[in-house]
Amino acid sequence: MAALADELERIAALAAGHARAGDRVSAVIPTEPFPGKRVSLCAFDDADGYRSWLALDGDGRAVTGRRELRDAVTVAVLCEIATDAAGGGDLDDLIERLRELRETEAPPGIEDAEEAAHALRRVVGEPPQLATPARLDEIGTAARRLEQELDPGSGSPFAAAMRSAEGAVAELQREIEGGYRVPLD
């Protein structure tokens, strides 16, 4: 995680070189939509509260390809939604409730559910995290395992959250493209 934090600082410094008077770099979202293809989504806020965007590749060059930008936005949004949906949205609280349930009632299978919740917590980790398709798959697999341990016959709230993500992806794509700092191909 320290290496990623260092990378984010480097990208933020490079992004600051694209800032206009009164702007500040307010976010750097690291993605790797394809193995070895880093794209960082950099948000700039101006003094009037207007947000604009620029994506930088791993070498700090502005991304000008619309497809490349959209791939980065898509994986960023999906990883964010997956992280938020994992374990019902408050994984630490769920882990605590499972612990209490084990100690007070000890229902069959509670240890397996606790282990699945801890495994999901390890996969989700702490920010910053690199948004990748592999990370998305890991979160999905761990979330489904936990759902199966909690209620093997139920549908997947995680899958439902991911199916509803299309609107969020489209919304952020519109925002970024609408306030993009360089022309897109």
Image: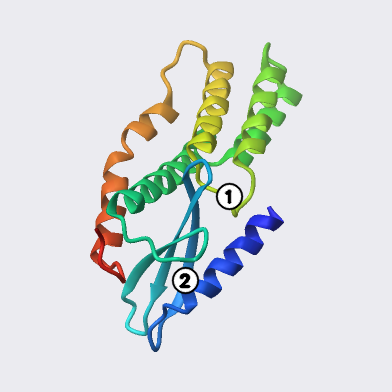
Residue at the spot 44% in from the left edge and 30% down from the top edge: 158
Mark earlier in primary sequence (1, 2): 2
Name which residue lies at 40% across and 87% down: 22
User: Around disc 1, counting alpha carbons within 10 Å, would you say few (fewer than 14), some (14 to 19), or many (20 or more)?
Assistant: some
| Picture layout, residue 24 above or below residue 85 | below
Q: Amino acid at mark 2?
A: Ser
Residue at position x 40%, y 73% in the image: 44
Circle 1 sits on which residue? Answer: 129
Q: Is residue 82 above or below residue 76?
A: above
Element under disc 2: strand
Is 139 on the left or on the right of 55, as rendered? right
Q: Residue at x 57, y 24 (%)?
A: 146
Q: Who is closer to the viewer here, 75 or 184?
A: 184
List the residue tagged with mark 2: 26
Structural distance between the alpha carbons of marks 1 and 2: 17 Å
Label 1 SS: loop
Residue 127, horizontal then vertical, whole percent? 60, 53
- Callout 1, which amino acid? Gln
